[in-house]
Structures are given as C-alpha cells and as structure tokens.
Image: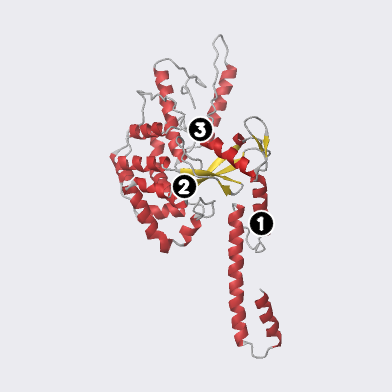
Amino acid sequence: MARLGGIQRRLQSCVNRGGLKRLEKKLQGDLNNILKKEELMWYQRSRAKWLKDGDRNTRYYHLKTVNRRRRNNVIMLKNESGQWVDDVVQLQNLATDFYKKLFADNQINRQWHNTSVTYPMLDTLMMNKLAAPICVEEVKKAVFSMHPWKAPGPDGFPARFYQKSWEIVGETVYKFVENVWQNPSAISDVNKTDICLIPKIDKPEYVTQFRPISLCNTNYKIVSKVIVERLKECVASLISPYQTGFVPGRNIHENIVVAKEMAHTMHSMKGRKGAFAIKVDLSKAYDKLSWEFIWKVLTEIQFPETLINVIMHSITSVTTNVKWNGTRSEFFRPWPGIRQGDPISPYLFVLCMDKLSHIILQAVEEGKWKGIRAGRQGPMISHL
C-alpha cells in the first residue's frame, strides 16, 4: 500500500505517466486480490452463514470470529468431584479422558432380537445402483454439494479447495474414492477427526454440557457423501412411516402434530381404562451405537457386500482427538459409536433405530403392546 501511495503521488507531478499508470494498475490489482483473500480468510474463521458484500474492511467477519472464539473458549470447569479446574493442561486432560471413557468399549452384552417384522426387500434395480462402480460424476456431485467453508478436519483443507481446484485435483480425488470402493481399508489413511466441543448452554460447568462435533477430513467426507447419495435413493422405502426425521420426503413436524393429537385424545378419554405415553431420551445416542449392531442391520437389509464393507471401514477405522481451545490433544481410537459431523451418521442412526420399531410392531402383533386411535376410524398408533 505504501508503494502504491508513492506512485499515486508521483503521478500528480510527473509528465510522462504511461509507465507509472501501468504499474499503478498492476499494484491496485494485487491489492484487491490481497484484500479479497483477507476477506475470505476472516469469513472462513467467522463461520458466518452468509457473505456481507462490499464489507472489505473485514470488520463484520472479525467481530464474528472474536465472538465465536470468546463463546467457545473455556477457562475453567468442574471435574467429577465438583472441584474447579483452571490449569490449561489439566482442562485438556479432563476433556480428553472424558471422551476416551465415553468411546471405550464397555463390553455390554447386546442381545440381537430376531423379529418377524423386518426391513422391506430392495428390488434388483436398486441393488444394482447401490453396487455400481464409482463414476466421476457422482464424486464431483458429492464435492460440490458440500458447504465450501465449513470447518475443516486435521488436514486443514475446506471443501472450497477441492471445488476451486477441481480441474486440477478432480481426477486424483476420483481415483482415491474408486480405490476406497475396491479396497475399503484405504479409508483409514484419511480417517482422522478433530472433536470440537460446542457449549450447549451459556455458562457450562461440566464437560457433559458440551456437544462434541467431529470435524472430518474433507477427502473422507467426499467418500461419506458418495455413500449418502446412494442411500438417499432407498432409505425412504426401508424406514417405517413411524420415523420422519432424516428421511428424504418426510418432515419431523409430522410426528409432532401426531403426538399432539395423541396427547389430546388421552386427555379426553373417559371410563375406567386410560392410556399413557412414554418419552424416551437417548443419552449420547450416536456415541453408544454398537458397530456390531450396525453391521447386523446392514446385513439384514441385504445391502451389497461392497457397500457394507466401505461403510464399516469408514466408521471403525477412525482415530480422533479433542481440540481444546484450539489445541489438539493426542490421537486415540474410539471403539463404539458414530460421529456427529459425519454425513453418513444420521442415515445409519435411523436405519438402526428402525429395528426398535420392528420390536414394538411385533409386540403389537402378539398383543403385548397396545396403541391408541385418535378416532374410531383412525390408524392405531403404537409409537413415533
């Protein structure tokens, strides 16, 4: 900027301005490029959801970044004994030890329930689509469907890098995904994750009051996105109508309306017999989902073996660390669970939770569980 200012001052007194004009134009272009890069840098750091056009001084993004870091920065927490801890190293160890225990295999004997109610059979056309070789178009679609500036994983590359450089890196990315499809264990090379802790409340006091979000490497997320795009085509036909969340073509608000109607019906009941509802809250639902259970669900659905292998290697080969106030802890290998932040996780979760629907529906068939109707001609609702 100082050089540009000097040239502009000389232009005011110089007669032969041709060379200076060209140099001024070049320096002005360089300055604009630098300012644009600075704006994008602060935009990425701010995690803002929209661009504020024309705000080249970056004040908006800088304030967003400062506020976000101030909210997420933790200076003290209580340990399991209720004592305050404010030492930086002890705080990081407190968080890391908590998640090491949470993700440890506790050797619980999980019984598999064989039910008469099961997942619908997929037709031959759908099975062929799921088992089809990887093509360049679906990899490119996965890359460009990603938010360009979402927080990157340990490799530091946001999706924007792959989108902007697709003509250069596209073939390499495609070959990587194709290799993973042929050799699923290759996914472990990029399957590293930062656990970023987001406060659930304004003034958290315990580690349990943070939401762990997994920041996966973008090249891993590309593989996960390819899997998701294939699952999207069949998941609606596999999941029972009682589940409305994370299913394409359905809306979670549908179940909210039904639940409200059921509650009104129960309040309006007269006579000796009444009814009651049970609300079940699953604590750490993603973190405790058994890998063996996931494999059994995928096998019962009869997904192609190649797809099952890619999915299982994707969720079992991960190594992770806790990113505490911007500093990474040591990497460790979690045993059960799926990650919040992995594109495939919501779909695996609803497929596994539908097994609970199968158990309830079988209990209804056997007369062990009875639902209620909102009206005489209405459907019997046993669960949502």
Disc with the residue nearer the chain's start (2 vs 3): 2
Res 6 quadrant in image? bottom right
Count of numbered badges drawn on the protein: 3
The residue closer to the viewer here, 3 or 301, is 3
Q: Position of residue 145 (x, y in %)?
A: 46, 52
Disc with the residue nearer the chain's start (2 vs 1): 1
Res 317 quadrant in image? top left
Q: Secondary structure at mark 2?
A: strand
Q: Secondary structure at mark 1?
A: helix
Which residue type does callout 1 highlight?
His
Which residue type does callout 3 highlight?
Ala
Please give the residue where the numbered disc 3 appears in the rendered image. 285
The residue closer to the viewer here, 98 or 238, is 98
Q: Position of residue 363 (x, y in %)?
A: 42, 19
Residue extending farthest to the top is 272
Q: Secondary structure at mark 3?
A: loop
Please give the residue where the numbered disc 1 appears in the rendered image. 62
Q: Is residue 126 visible?
A: yes
Mark-to-mark CA distance, 2 and 1: 29 Å
Residue at 50%, 51% in the rendered image: 154
Please give the residue where the numbered disc 2 appears in the rendered image. 192
Which residue type does callout 2 highlight?
Lys
Q: Which quadrant holds the N terminus? A: bottom right
Q: Residues within 10 Å of mark 1 (few under 14, many from 20)?
A: some
